[in-house]
Image (spheres, rainbow, N blue to C red):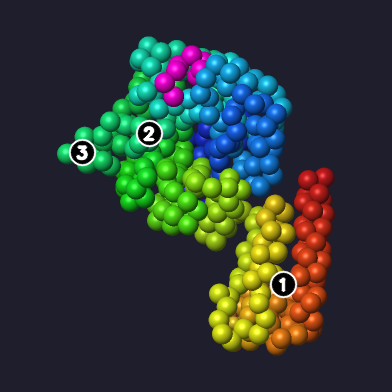
Amino acid sequence: MSKCRNRTSTKAVKVGNLTIGEYNEIVIQTMTTTKTSDVEKTVEQIKQLNNYGAQLVRVAVLDEADASALAEIVKKTKTPIIADIHFNYQFALRAIAAGVAKIRINPGNIGSKEQVLQILQAANQKGTAIRIGINGGSLKIDPKGSRVIQLVNCAYSWIKFFEKNGFYNLIVSIKDSDPSTTYFANVELAKHCKYPIHLGVTESGPDHAGIVKSCIALIPLLNMGIGNTIRISVNGDRKNEIKIAKTLLNNMGFNIPYYNIVACPLCGRNQYDTKRWVKEIDQYLEDKHLAIKVGIMGCIVNGPGEAQGCDIAICVKDKTTSFLYLNGTLNKEIPNTEVSKTLKELIDKKYNQAVKHYEKLNK
Ligand code: SF4
């Protein structure tokens, strides 16, 4: 993995084939929506999510059947699996024995301290990482006190407990459905936490709300160097979570091979409806993992200027014709009926060049 700019120094933690923290790139994770005991569907979804760009996938372990399915899921997937467990320390022990890369627990609800100790011993023996996941929704918060301080104190008290008992293979998260609480709690946490931090706003709602809340909390944290893995939680399509996460990191300048579409919002000046092109090209690029900037502009007011910063750009000239720009320079005029096909051909060319370059580097 390449090194990441401006991260606060944390311990490096191995999670399967990934190293999280220190100065490593930020890792994107998400969660399956299938019943974990349905191995076939869960494995299929993990593979899909990985294709979209999720590097870590979490599965919920709700009951005996889910716990029993973990070993087979681990065997059938290359993506590091995180088992998400509440209320039952036995499931945590079984997840560790099944070979998951990490378990995510809220130690406050998993069982007694003795039972948490058993988990730590088993995880230490097996080299399994643990995320201490403190979540505003599952913590008893005194409404008279500071929510931020209570979340942070809870996280620190468990970090100390884990350290006192010889466990250091740790990742920590504090999430809340209120983005400002999430932000301030993580600022406080990062002051003294030497372990990688997983960031996310929990229960953030439908896509539009999830995007806004995640941006409010995550952008300033990431800019401060805080956060080593992220999840954008939205009540919607899982693919969108990953697209949003990758778009966020890409636009913040992190090293994510992803696409960037510059498209005007359209107005009464546009001569041709470019919405269909934007939709088609967005779908065409979404699982290509290609670093490319594509411009699709509705007229010549801002079109030529934006096209200068793009690898490939279209700027509508009139009802029948558009200007095609390559690497910021005007290339030729093409009929509007050929724009979609031309853009896809040029994207394919770029993609094949990138694949060849990658193969050469890895020879
Ligand atoms: S680029 Fe042209 S069509 Fe697009 S929003 Fe601006 S003025 Fe309107």
Whether residue 163 is visible to the viewer of this picture, yes or no, is no
Residue at 28 percent across and 31 percent down: it is 140
Mark 1–mark 2 Cα distance, whole angstroms, equals 44 Å
Query: Predominant secondary structure in magenta?
Result: helix
Mark 2–mark 3 Cα distance, whole angstroms, equals 17 Å
SS at mark 1 in the image? strand
Residue 345, given in percent of the width and then of the height, sits at 82, 66
Pointer 3 residue Cβ closer than 8 Å to ligand 1 = no
Residue 161, given in percent of the width and then of the height, sits at 35, 22
Residue 219, given in percent of the width and then of the height, sits at 44, 55
Pick the front one: 214 or 154: 214
SS at mark 3 in the image? loop
Highlighted magenta segment, given as a residue range: 86-93
Do the residues bearing badges 2 and 3 touch, measured as CB atoms within 8 Å? no
Of the two numbered discs 2 and 3 in the rendering, the one whose residue sits closer to the viewer: 3
Query: Which mark is first along the chain, 3 or 2?
Result: 2
Quarter of the view holding residue 32:
top right
Do the residues bearing badges 1 and 2 touch, measured as CB atoms within 8 Å? no
Query: Which mark is first along the chain, 2 or 1?
Result: 2
Above or below — where is 257 with respect to 339? Answer: above
Residue type beneath disc 2? Ile
Residue 134: mark in rendering: 2
Q: Quadrant of the C terminus?
A: top right
On the image, numbered disc 3 is attached to which residue?
143
On the image, numbered disc 1 is attached to which residue?
312
Residue at 66 percent across and 85 percent down: it is 271
